[in-house]
């Protein structure tokens, strides 16, 4: 998703996160002058910095405990960006394991499929007095700033929000992103990795109301903290963490569902 919007090839993006990218390689792929490109990226939540003659994501040098992570969840009235929209958006900003800020809003809509209402318990009437999509997205963009975007199965939330920003005439997101599901697969042994299952197994959020945005955000927050606690000692920076979540070997899953055994025992 980043490769499409940043106008750089996948190899260059990988080098920005790890070994650094030369000025020539960077400039050869830019649509604009270097300084303008860096400024445009910054406005879209991405910081690229020069270090010892090469260019890197600034997160390549940011210790995990000093970074701001924005854990996000959305509810939508369907999965297709062309005809559906966000109906609820929630997020928390996390730094050094502590929630430092919160964002939560319903979004005004004229249509919610009964099936969606059944899952989320959000009706059209609930959104009647809520702000419109443009208002909510502009406020969220300011809240997100340049934090690392974290979500469970991050691609859907990231792309839906990014494309929704484009629909209202704003630039897409370029923030670095982290998938809490992929990270959990490498730090926590579980039979399944759906958020509701992990909450049942690990008791992450005692007040969980699955498929409500802030509830799922707080469950993901608990999962994120547990994953960070289980990281190998050599994972120090944000880019170490992102690369680990994509490249490290997944942990072996149990052959049998331990929760089913608990049910039988009870």
Image (cartoon, rainbow, N blue to C red):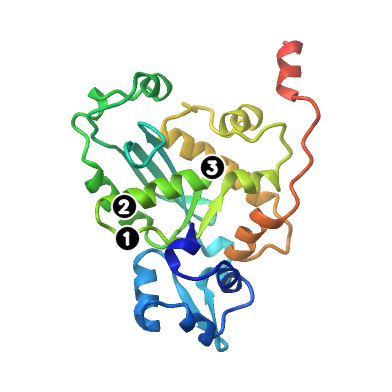
Q: CA distance from mark 3 to mark 2?
A: 20 Å
104 up-or-down from 249: above or below: above
Residue 37 in view here: yes
Residue 247 placement (x, y as % from top left): 69, 57
| Residue drawn at point x = 47 percent, y = 40 percent | 217
Do the residues bearing badges 3 and 2 touch, measured as CB atoms within 8 Å? Answer: no
Position of residue 233 in the picture relative to residue 45 (left or right): right
Q: Secondary structure at mark 3?
A: loop
Residue 92 in view here: no
Residue farthest along the left direction in this orientation:
129
Instruction: Please tell me which of labels 1 and 3 falls first in the chain.
Output: 3
Label 1 Cα neighbours within 10 Å, binned few <14 / some 14-19 / many ≥20 = some
23 up-or-down from 16: above or below: below
Do the residues bearing badges 1 and 2 touch, measured as CB atoms within 8 Å? Answer: yes
Instruction: Please tell me which of labels 3 and 2 falls first in the chain.
Output: 3
The residue singled out by tag 3 in the image is: 152
86 up-or-down from 165: above or below: above
Q: CA distance from mark 1 to mark 2?
A: 6 Å
| Residue drawn at point x = 36 percent, y = 42 percent | 81
The residue singled out by tag 1 in the image is: 171
Label 2 Cα neighbours within 10 Å, binned few <14 / some 14-19 / many ≥20 = some
Label 3 Cα neighbours within 10 Å, binned few <14 / some 14-19 / many ≥20 = many
The residue singled out by tag 2 in the image is: 165
Q: Secondary structure at mark 2?
A: helix
């Amino acid at each position: 998703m980043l490769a499409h919007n940043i106008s750089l090839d996948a190899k260059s993006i990988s080098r920005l996160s790890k070994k650094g990218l030369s000025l020539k390689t960077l400039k050869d792929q830019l649509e604009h002058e270097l300084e303008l490109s860096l400024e445009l990226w910054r406005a879209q939540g991405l910081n690229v910095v020069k270090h010892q003659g090469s260019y890197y994501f600034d997160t390549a040098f940011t210790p995990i405990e000093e970074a701001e992570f924005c854990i996000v969840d959305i509810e939508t009235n369907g999965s297709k960006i062309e005809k559906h929209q966000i109906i609820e958006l929630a997020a928390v900003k996390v730094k050094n394991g502590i929630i430092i800020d919160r964002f939560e809003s319903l979004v005004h809509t004229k249509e919610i499929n009964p099936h969606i209402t059944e899952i989320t318990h959000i009706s059209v009437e609930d959104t009647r007095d809520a702000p419109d999509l443009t208002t909510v997205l502009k406020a969220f963009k300011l809240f997100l700033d340049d934090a690392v975007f974290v979500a469970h199965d991050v691609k859907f939330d990231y792309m839906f929000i990014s494309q929704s920003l484009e629909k209202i005439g704003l630039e897409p997101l370029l923030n670095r992103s982290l998938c809490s599901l992929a990270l959990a697969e490498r730090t926590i042994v579980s039979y399944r990795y759906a958020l509701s299952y992990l909450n049942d197994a690990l008791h992450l959020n005692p007040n969980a109301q699955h498929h409500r945005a802030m509830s799922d955000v707080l469950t993901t927050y608990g999962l994120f903290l547990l994953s960070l606690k289980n990281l190998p000692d050599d994972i120090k920076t944000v880019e170490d963490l992102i690369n680990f979540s994509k490249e490290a070997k997944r942990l072996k899953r149990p052959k049998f569902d331990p929760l089913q055994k608990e049910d039988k025992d009870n």
